[in-house]
Amino acid sequence: MPTALLSVYDKTGVADMAAALRARGWKLVSSGGTAAVIADAGIEVTDVAELTGVPAILGHRVVTLHPRVHGGILADPTDAEHIADMAAHGIEPIDLVVVNLYPFASDPGVELIDIGGPAMVRAAAKNHAHVAVVVDPSDYDAVLADIDSHGSISLGLRRRLARDAFAHTAAYDAAIVDWFDRSDSSAESADSLPRTIHLALERAEVLRYGENPHQQGARYRDMNRGGGWWDTATQHGGKALSYLNLYDTEAAWRLVHRFDDPAVVIVKHANPCGVAAGSDIATAYRLANACDPVSAFGGIVAANRAVDAAMAIELAEVFTEVVVAPSFSADALAILTAKANLRVLSAAAPGDRIVDLRPIDGGLLVQHADPVPLDRSEWQVVTAAAPSDAQWADIEFAWLVCAAVSSNAIVYARDLQAVGIGAGQQNRLDSSRIAAERAAGRAAGGVCASDAFFPFRDGLDAAVAAGVTAVVQPGGSVRDAEVIAAADEAGITMVFTGRRHFRH
């Protein structure tokens, strides 16, 4: 008679699984709450304490850590030495281990660090040539179907279950390491990066393709941080999302949430090509699209307010890949979902990003995510002319936008509307010229933001030629005095933030 050991924290379906195994002639061994659930369902079960001869001790810290449990799981029935040891010590083989672990990530703490569970899971997964291990209730039906098809659990399924078991324990240990890193300030300073990083990701969504159609693509979820806004977003219409749809939508959604007023961001190839704040969301969209309507074609639109019919009518006239907002009015939804290829998403605000990861040969580059504080107490007006209140509003707006643009980044803005964006150039002068060309005279009286210092005055001169009356930049160049003098020459105001925002 084959034996199954069941000891689970998540008891979803465990009584049904136990009943199904008994109906197929399996013996059941269990412990604690799992045994109680099975027994209460009227199913015959042997308590682990009866198997081992030792009750649960140390406040339930030691229950299954016993040779009659682990010997039964780890025994190789084809090895004569194993057979002799089992006979000598009264060990019966265990053929199936059904175990899932204390939910450490839900309430991290020492008492939720499972010991016996991972030990059984790893033992069964190691001995998958002879033992099956199940860590996910969703696999119960597959196991029962396999038993019905083969009379036992097939090697192919045992291998797949073993792989999933090791992934389960790896994620569990990663959650514990992450807890230590976040809670133990004695080992390292609070602002340092950890000595090791342990990622536990599960595939949450298969995408149409990757960056290009010949590449596969998928979205993975952090198993130990509860997922993110993508896991709760609702897609109301349109085709399936592609890799670049997600990448660009993430960029647009994060940037639009930097603004308090009704705002719209349009992103194309990871860079904003339109950003504006307005008195209402339809006005904000109109102004954002006006920044660079050529680039906005086929872009991603993000709004930080509910989309109403007025915005939907205007947006429907422009080919757009994705529109994302907190919600949509019924009329707006009807207008937008009538466009078969437009993906319409409603979503919660994005969470804080802690670190950025980028692959390099043999590993990853890791850095803290780049916050963009608007703390004027740390900023310095370096010119004779000081900003007016209206200029301060545009300075802050342009600075938030510029920090989201690929370097070298130049943003021209006026009246809380980006009017020219120069992105991703190898020199700042070209970015200034591109931004001015796209502004087409609309930068006059506005603001220029630069993500890093001007190494020469020529970049500033280009901004002055575009008609700006205020500049915000980090400062820090050996030629700062020359650039400040050029600003004073032109009679404009300039603010140093003391913080660079390169984005590659």
Image (tube, rainbow, N blue to C red):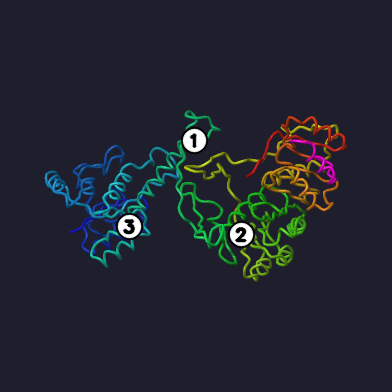
Residue 378 part of the magenta segment: no
Q: Is residue 333 above or below residue 61?
A: below
Seen at 57% across and 39% down, the residue is 368
Q: Is residue 465 magenta?
A: yes
Left or right: residue 160 versus residue 263 is left
The residue under label 1 is 194
Instruction: Please tell me the numbered disc located at residue 14.
Output: 3
Furthest-top residue in view?
A: 186
**Residue 224 seen in render:** yes
Q: Residue at x 62, y 55 (%)?
A: 249
Q: Which residues are magenta?
A: 455-470
Q: Position of residue 247 (x, y in %)?
A: 59, 54
Q: Earlier in the sequence, mark 2 or mark 1?
A: 1
- Disc number placed over residue 346 in the picture, else none: 2
**Which three-letter amino acid code belongs to the residue tagged 3?**
Val
Residue 55 in the image: above or below residue 21: above
Q: Residues within 10 Å of mark 2 (few under 14, many from 20)?
A: many
Please tell me how crowded label 1 is: few (under 14), some (14-19), or many (20+) other residues with Cα within 10 Å.
Answer: some
Inspect the image, locate mark 1, and give the three-letter code of the amino acid beneath it. Answer: Pro
User: Foreground residue, 299 or 99?
Assistant: 299
Res 265 → quadrant: bottom right
Q: Where in the figure is residue 425, as x and y percent of width and height?
A: 70, 46
Q: CA distance from mark 1 to mark 3?
A: 39 Å
Q: Give, as a three-letter code, the residue at label 2.
A: Ser
Q: Position of residue 224 (x, y in %)?
A: 46, 47
Question: Which badge, 2 or 3, is on the more N-terminal residue?
Answer: 3
Q: Depth-wise, is mark 2 or mark 3 nearer the camera? A: 2
In front of the other: 428 or 166: 428
